[in-house]
Amino acid sequence: MRVGIDARSLRRGPPGVATYVRHLLEELPYLDPWDRTWPRNNLFWNQLWGLWGQLFRQWRLYHAPAYTSPLVNVRPVVLTVHDVAYLARPEWYPYRLDPVRRGYYRRSLQTARRIIVPSRFSRDEITSRFPPLADRVHVVPLGVGKEFYPDSEGARRVAESRRLPERYLLHVGDLHPRRKVEWIIAAGRRLGFPVVLVGRRLAEIPVDLGTVTVLSDLSLEDLRGVYSGAELFVYPSLYEGFGLPLLEAMACGVPVAAVTCGSIPEVCGDAAVLVPPDPEALVEGVREARNRRAELAEAGLRRAGEFSWRRTARLTEEVYHQACR
């Protein structure tokens, strides 16, 4: 079986989708990564190259790994939808959200033969809004790669090269309002910890970032070092379809404090301190996580071990076979 997969994310992101596609390609050798540099417009690219590949590259099916797919298809399409933030909380959506984009997202859902989501939370978000799609939606959790592990030497190296604080609270993920990084900064000030943020700034953040270390475009080695050197990983996101950085932090042996929103409890299980989405509660959560640091680090390593990209690929392969029936 030869399966085409949109691989544009490997060249230009977003980082989470690129991680997802890269690991599927490593685990499923029959995937055919498909990328063309023009046009940059996603709608036009899908209609031109998505259909062209289906016609001429002898694919059995086509996997669109990030929300949208061609409007016209001659092969079955498997669509991955990581969340439906654009419907649930459009005010938090970090990209321009006009009627064309909304309509295109919905049309892609409706034309897909099968829909992959990374969590039960995302499945329920979709099926509550589109009940006729319920039989097509399959939960396939994401994984964490072997490139993430406790790395004290890498932590020392990246701390020196990036001039990081000796101990810091860490957040990894693109910066926009739903991630509530201002709560992390406030908690750090209250408890005497500097803050390191890793991610692209996709929207205005209602806080002065001048006293905060902001990093982006890190290599995997540097990212592992930044994780490994953190005192705590703090994730007060108000809406997440999965939350890969949670698993990456745990795999690096970093205790996690997060909020009880979206898929976060589903991913973390009992391996993190989870608090209500409130800035004062987050301060207490960070304090508790620090007091339980060794216990949570061990629990996080066990939890991360339950999620592998091999399992993600195996479950994805089952969806492919169902889409071909």
Image: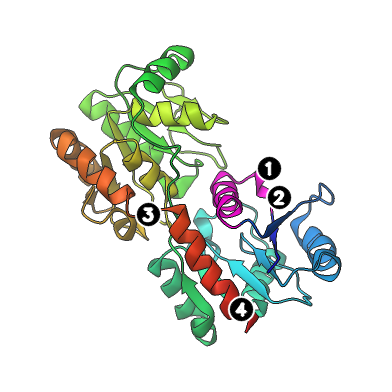
- Residue at numbered disc 1: 12
Question: Which secondary structure is most common in the magenta stretch?
Answer: helix
- Residue at numbered disc 4: 323
* Amino acid type at image mark 3: Phe
Please identify the residue farthest to the left as the structure is shown.
Answer: 291
Give how far across and how far down residue 21 sits, in percent.
Answer: 60, 52
User: Mark 1 touching mark 2, by CB under 8 A?
Assistant: yes
Q: Using a 10 Å C-alpha cutoff, classify the residue at mark 2 as few (fewer than 14 neighbours), some (14 to 19) or many (20 or more).
A: some
Q: Compared to 133, does 138 lie above or below?
A: above
User: Mark 2 touching mark 3, by CB under 8 A?
Assistant: no
Q: Closer to us: mark 2 or mark 4?
A: 4
Query: 228 and 284: which one is in front?
Result: 228
Q: Magenta segment range?
A: 7-28
Task: Using residue 31 as the reference point, say whether residue 37 is left or right of it.
Answer: right
Query: 292 and 89: which one is in front?
Result: 292
- Residue at numbered disc 3: 307
- Residue at numbered disc 2: 8
Q: Compared to 211, does 46 lie above or below?
A: below
Q: Compared to 181, does 244 lie above or below?
A: below
Q: Using a 10 Å C-alpha cutoff, classify the residue at mark 4 as few (fewer than 14 neighbours), some (14 to 19) or many (20 or more).
A: many
